[in-house]
Image (spheres, grey):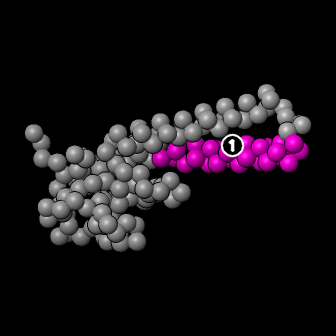
């Protein structure tokens, strides 16, 4: 069962989430660049019939791409171990499961926002974000302590 957060619990994690989210965004960009460079080299080698293959360079490019992918995967795992759900690295979007009137919904936060100010149904996503109002504040809950 996933962890469910109160707004306070989720907001207390934002400094840590922000740090790892920024790292994941940088790693994703690095991975995309490494993948593109490797694909370009592969196409060039193929178009030249494999004649101009620099095996050391190709191996280094593949190793760089693979290491970046592993670092990205590990960073996302660290983020998700907190209980949050990484939704979109391109915009730094993260959701936190919570209960509202007995049903699971998400607290929604985007990198750069000063606090968690929105929520949405699990089926709606970012486009369905609604402002957290007094009713939501009084009716939402996290996990009850055991």
Residue 43 inside the magenta-drawn segment = yes
Tell me residue 55's x, y (percent): 80, 29
Against 122, is 30 above or below? above
Tell me residue 64's x, y (percent): 67, 34
Q: Residues within 10 Å of mark 1 (few under 14, many from 20)?
A: many
Q: Quadrant of the rendered structure where residue 65 is?
A: top right
Against 131, is 29 above or below? above
Tell me residue 53's x, y (percent): 85, 34
Is 44 on the left or on the right of 82, as rendered? right
The residue carrying mark 1 is 34
Residue closest to the eye, 123 or 14: 123
Residue closest to the eye, 126 or 70: 70
Q: Residue at x 76, y 34 (%)?
A: 58
Is 112 on the left or on the right of 104, as rendered? right
Q: Residue at x 77, y 43 (%)?
A: 42
Is 121 on the left or on the right of 58, as rendered? left
Q: Is residue 31 visible?
A: yes
Q: Residue at x 35, y 56 (%)?
A: 95
């Amino acid at each position: 069962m996933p962890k469910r957060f109160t707004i306070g619990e989720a907001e207390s994690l934002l400094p840590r989430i922000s740090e790892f989210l920024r790292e994941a965004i940088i790693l994703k960009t690095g991975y995309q660049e490494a993948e593109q460079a490797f694909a370009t080299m592969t196409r060039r080698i193929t178009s030249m019939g494999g004649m101009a293959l620099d095996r050391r360079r190709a191996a280094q490019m593949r190793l760089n791409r693979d290491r970046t992918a592993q670092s990205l995967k590990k960073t996302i795992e660290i983020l998700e171990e907190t209980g949050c759900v990484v939704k979109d690295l391109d915009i730094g979007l993260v959701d936190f499961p919570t209960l509202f009137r007995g049903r699971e919904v998400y607290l929604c936060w985007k990198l750069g926002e000063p606090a968690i100010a929105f929520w949405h149904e699990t089926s709606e996503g970012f486009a369905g974000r609604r402002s957290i109002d007094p009713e939501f504040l009084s009716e939402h809950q996290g996990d009850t302590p055991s």
